Amino acid sequence: MGVQYMPGFGNDFETESLPGALPQGQNSPQRPAYGLYAEQLSGSPFTAPRGTNERSWLYRIRPSVKHTGRFSAVRFDSWKSAPNLGDHELALGQLRWNPMPLPNAETDFLAGVHTMTTAGDAQGQAGMATHVYAFNSSMVDDYFFNADGELLLVPQEGGLRLKTEMGIIEIQPGEIAILPRGMIFQVELMSGPARGYMCENYGAKFTLPDRGPIGANCLANPRDFKTPVAWYEDKERPCRLFVKWCGQFHVTEIGHSPLDVVAWHGNYAPYKYDLSTYSPVGAILFDHPDPSIFTVLTAPSGEEGTANIDFVIFPPRWMVAEHTFRPPWYHRNIMSEFMGLIKGQYDAKEEGFVPGGASLHNMMLPHGPDAFGFDKATKAELKPVKLEDTMAFMFETRFPQHLTRYAAETDTLQDNYIDCWNDLKKRFNGTPEGDWS
Ligand SMILES: [Fe+2]
């Protein structure tokens, strides 16, 4: 039987993998069925307003206190947390990277995560980190949770099976998954090696953006988000639980799997989403809206309209605007933009920005179409054109993004990205017509 999911975003779900395992009418019976332990997992303070209050009740073989023994410190030097300042010498700039190579040595998910940028402060629960990952082996008896934030996984190559406390999620390139803060999980490969991107959100959880005048439909629709049904393993052999907590890693050795939740109910749970179900809204006469029109999920900060993180995609779509420069316009931005490409081409950069690669346009640094893209867009016949077979995305944050030493010194950093604008020539010649030769 394949993996099963429940549809909806932020629902109050209930699910049991054994009949009668989920208590009805109360959360904490004196003796839960099957000898299970009842435990609450709080994703928000108890007293958070109803609209942002998140918790689930888990009915498990052992309480979570049995999934930790004494901790010892352990190092994963390539996974950094904010603040992580001043560990490289690279000067400010617009930057672009080629894809992270797949490893040769045996590498699992935890060892395969390489942080590119950090922003804000994990301990202040504000900001984020952008990571790339590449790995070639599954976690077997190792498990992990991240106390520092929720994780948004964006596969670019290779499918992932995410075994979590609350069920199994399988994702392929073109899909994303969100693992809430504190959720214990294990990452398995589904076929070959895997590569992709991950955004770590230190702040308030991702939610759906308001649609304003767009109305009640389009963009990411709630029914297309999928939460797994309950699943457990009753596995008794030496296992390790790794934890990232305020940027430090720790490990504890236990004698069983911590993925032992037989039934659960609540609204704090992992989920996945297929980006091809996103219904883009855009220009149908001239100009085009700001890229925020393509927001899939937004993680709010305390300030209205000023996201801790926006997760934005650039999906296949029709370009129909009349008398309009159709690619993204030139831009300087108080927000900081980290982009990746899952497949195909991005319309502002047909060359150099390749699937698996990344770019960074940091706070107030100018960016926009390269010279080739500008030339093409200003000469194109403006008939309807469909951008096909493409999927770029952006992790955009209100905080400046600080490079890690890895991002600053890796061989995949392109040293000539800034040259992509060299051939933009002066078109102003004092006449109203300008020089469009
Ligand atoms: Fe921009």
Image (cartoon, rainbow, N blue to C red):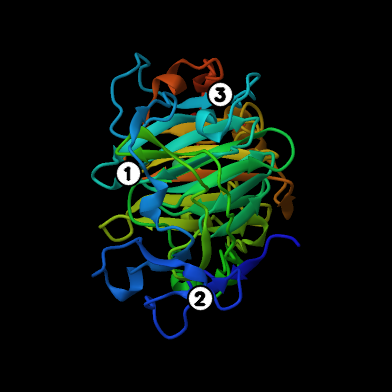
Residue 259, above or below 106: below
Query: Which residue is rendered at x = 34% and y = 68% of the image?
Result: 52
Number of residue marks:
3
Q: Which residue is mark 1?
A: 127
Q: Closer to us: mark 2 or mark 3?
A: 2
Circle 1 crowding by C-alpha within 10 Å: few under 14, some 14–19, many from 20? many
Q: Is residue 17 visible?
A: yes
Closer to the eye: label 1 or 3: 1
Q: Residue at x 38, y 16 (%)?
A: 90
Amino acid type at image mark 2:
Leu
Label 3: how many Cα within 10 Å (few below 14, some 14–19, many 20+): some
Q: Earlier in the sequence, mark 2 or mark 3?
A: 2
Q: Earlier in the sequence, mark 1 or mark 3?
A: 1
Q: Position of residue 98 (x, y in %)?
A: 59, 24
Q: What residue is shown with label 2?
A: 22
At horizontal 58% and vertical 61% (from top left) the residue drawn is: 282
Q: What secondary structure is marked by label 1?
A: strand
Q: Horizontally, is 154 left or right of 40 in the view?
A: right
Quadrant of the rendered image containing residue 141: top right
Element marked by disc 2: loop
